[in-house]
Image (cartoon, helix red, strand yellow):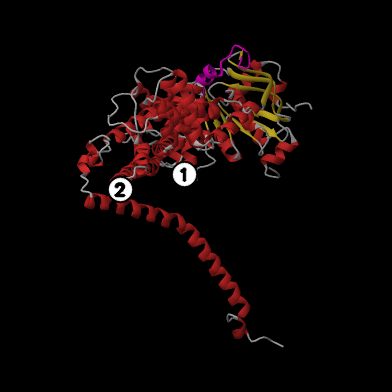
Amino acid sequence: MSHASTTAESEDSSTIDTALSTESRDDRSSRPDETVIRSSGLDVYYGEDQALDGIDMEIPARKVTALIGPSGCGKSTFLRSINRMNDLIDVARVDGDLYFRRKNVYDADVDPVALRRKIGMVFQKPNPFPKSIRDNVAYGLRVQGKTDDVDGRIEEALRGAALWDEVEDRLGESGLELSGGQQQRLCIARAIATDPEVILMDEPASALDPVATAKIEDLIEDLAREYTVVIVTHNMQQAARISDKTAVFLTGGNLVEFGDTNEVFSNPENDRVEDYITGKFG
Amino acid sequence: MSHDTAESLHTDDSLRWEKLKNRLFLGLCISASLFGVVALVLLLADVVYESVAGIVEFDISIVHFLTQGARRDPEDAGFMAAIAASVWLMILTTLMAFFIGVSSAVYLEEYAPDTRITRLIEANLANLAGVPSVVYGLLVLAAIVNGIGTGSILLAGAIALALLIVPIIIVATQESLRAVPDGLRHGSFATGATRWQTIRGVVLPAAMPGIFTGTILALARAIGETAPIIMVGILFTARTPPGPFDTFSAMPSQIYIWAAQPQPHFHHLAALGIVVLLAFMLSMNAAAVFLRNRYETDL
């Protein structure tokens, strides 16, 4: 049951080395890598079924980290264990540690509501509320009590989500009137309006057409200037295009490879990963 | 031995018999579905005929009928007191049943864990919905009218009707809540909302049209309920009830008492009363349908 963390990073004992190895290709930030999320021996069970098996991962700040792998490999489960959305599933159980800024989010004194205010999330199927565009973006601000300069924050979030130009004249219209791609950008605006540190994205473009997908991909690269982005994707080309780090999960909830995207794609250490990314299975 | 193709494409006897069976079955189904409509049309025709006959033969004034209270003299009797009592009953019943029903449904759908106790509560709600209305009338008569000693007041009647429709409102609300996609709840939780914020800000607004529709349909049933109103209310009063602690005779019981009188004049008053009661019920149903169509959104 050993988890095959055979990547260069994991074998490095020193995080400074890790930082140096990525800095050379880091064109987004001059800062050294700073780990925002770190999991250590993370197991997740749904009832009797083990969905994640001993995941060790360090997710750097203001980078795009892609989680890829075949269906049912646990990548979405890992994403949802970061902001404790798995708490909403009665039968889900978590062992091991997951640190956000050096605080174990599964400690008894951590309130998942407070945690989710620091970690935004965008879902696979666009899920705008049946409210106006304005109220969709303002929703997080209202529930979090950030009621000063709401209009300014709404505009900023919609600009951040590359949606402002398309909706500035119709903020009062229902969010459900928008196209699928616009709805998804509205959901991104909703997630960034409250200025979280991390944005989790669960296959955000899988329900969209290629043009809308391209817009979302551009947007994700922009978001990584300010936010730490963790994205689950089925699409390996997408992971290669937009991510700085790639984690490959294979069936059984194992993390088999984690490293710089370039290295994972050009020179995977694990044979099964090579088979997967060259399309031999999955 | 080759068959004549053109011949074999014609309808032969065995096919003819099958087609006849098809038509017979179709006719059976159509007659069955027309049964309800025909019954309703006959009922309406009878009531309207009786009302018109009353207006023509007994010279009943509609204005007088709608503005005066009940009297012993049929020439002078009106429906106003009963209409007012029914409107009072609806208001008080709504106040009680809506909040109890919606709160229970929110608890059961949004909070309650899926345990044996929750399932027991849900099964019993289904049972409650099937309890005959006269039983609720007896309960309120024994416990409140005589037990507490309130007498036959509007509030007691409203309690009986609320007991009657709470299970209906709960079931309608549960269905509306279940129709709200989980994606909306997750979107709200992921934004850092608490459960209460999620329910108040997203789930209830999305479910509200369905909840209102179910509530109005339940009230439309309550306004026509006769048994509990006869048990709890008084049968005859000329007075328009000024408040919830006054005695009352609502539309169904007024109709009942008129229909039981020997003089034919009263029977025509009863028919007119039924027209008014049906007008209330049908407009409530229409409001429910309008709400459902108006706010139907694809979530």
Q: How many marks?
A: 2
* Residue lying at 33% horizontally and 51% vertically, measured from the top left: B47
Q: Residues within 10 Å of mark 2 (few under 14, many from 20)?
A: some
Is A126 inside the magenta-drawn segment?
A: no
* Frontmost residue, B60 versus A140: B60
Disc 2 to disc 1, C-alpha distance = 78 Å
Whether labels 2 and 1 share one chain: no
Residue B86 quadrant: top left
Residue A261 visible in this rendered orientation of the protein:
no
Choose mark 2 or mark 1, whichever is in front: 2
* Frontmost residue, A270 versus A117: A117
Tag 2 near tag 1, CB within 8 Å: no
Q: Residues within 10 Å of mark 1 (few under 14, many from 20)?
A: few
* Frontmost residue, B78 versus B74: B74
Above/below status of B35 relative to B84: below
Q: Is residue B113 left or right of residue B40?
A: right
* Residue lying at 22% horizontally and 36% vertically, measured from the top left: B67
Q: Which residues are magenta?
A: A104-121
Which circle marks residue B61 in the picture? none
Work out which residue is located at the far top of the displayed protein and give it: A109
Q: Residue A272: image x %, image y %?
A: 74, 37
Q: Residue B274: image x %, image y %?
A: 34, 44
Query: What's the amino acid at mark 1?
Result: Val
